[in-house]
Amino acid sequence: MMTICLWVPEGKALEVAQYYCGIFKPSQLLSQSEWVCQFDLNGQRFMALQGGDQFKPNEAVSIMMTCKGQAEIDHYWDALVADGGQEQACGWLKDKYGFSWQIVPYNLNQLMQSPEAITRFMGMKKIQISELI
């Protein structure tokens, strides 16, 4: 089993876990201690480690959420950019904790078969599936 470990500021592990569990369904808070919270989001295990301010998240690592349709893209995108998140290009965003996400349709490769679709995609922030068809 693989677990994604998110380095978070001191005092924020439970807050981070509850934030993501409120967005992703199914989700579950698995355990918590003074320094660590483990949680499951949609079948993927995560751990929030209260490591302090020594390291900051950056775009070198992102979490990709493949979505079944536009409504699911809209749900995750809107929830993750709310309250201080930042929209970025081509389906990427940073959430309010600075973690990078890719919110994309499950069939993105199939949608990107024409030069016109690629051009439209490159101009998007949140992906609009209808504009790629």
Image (cartoon, helix red, strand yellow):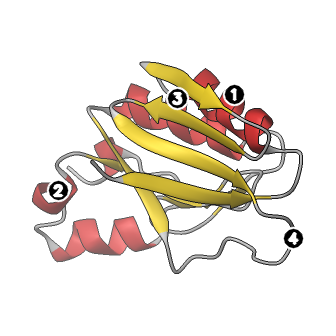
Considering the numbered disc 4 on the image, is that residue within a helix, a strand or a loop? Answer: loop
Disc 3: which residue: 75
Label whose residue precedes the other's in the sequence (4 or 3)? 4
Residue 36 percent coordinates (x, y) = 68, 44
In whole angstroms, how far apart are the C-alphas of marks 2 and 3? 20 Å
Considering the numbered disc 2 on the image, is that residue within a helix, a strand or a loop? Answer: helix
Considering the numbered disc 1 on the image, is that residue within a helix, a strand or a loop? Answer: helix
10 Å crowding of disc 2: few (<14), some (14-19), many (20+): some
Query: Which label sits in the foreground, 4 or 3?
Result: 4
Rendered image quadrant of residue 59: bottom right
* Image disc number at residue 18: 1
The answer to whether residue 50 is left or right of residue 94 is: right
Q: Amino acid at mark 2?
A: Leu
Disc 2: which residue: 111
Residue 112 percent coordinates (x, y) = 18, 65
Residue located 72% across and 40% down the image: 16
Q: Amino acid at mark 4?
A: Asp
Q: Residue most toward the front?
A: 33
Labels 3 and 1 touching (C-beta < 8 A): no
10 Å crowding of disc 4: few (<14), some (14-19), many (20+): few
The answer to whether residue 29 is left or right of residue 130 is: right
10 Å crowding of disc 3: few (<14), some (14-19), many (20+): some
In whole angstroms, how far apart are the C-alphas of marks 3 and 1? 17 Å
Residue 12 percent coordinates (x, y) = 83, 44
Labels 2 and 3 touching (C-beta < 8 A): no
Label whose residue precedes the other's in the sequence (3 or 1)? 1
Residue located 19% across and 77% down the image: 115
Considering the numbered disc 3 on the image, is that residue within a helix, a strand or a loop? Answer: helix
Query: Which label sits in the foreground, 3 or 1?
Result: 1
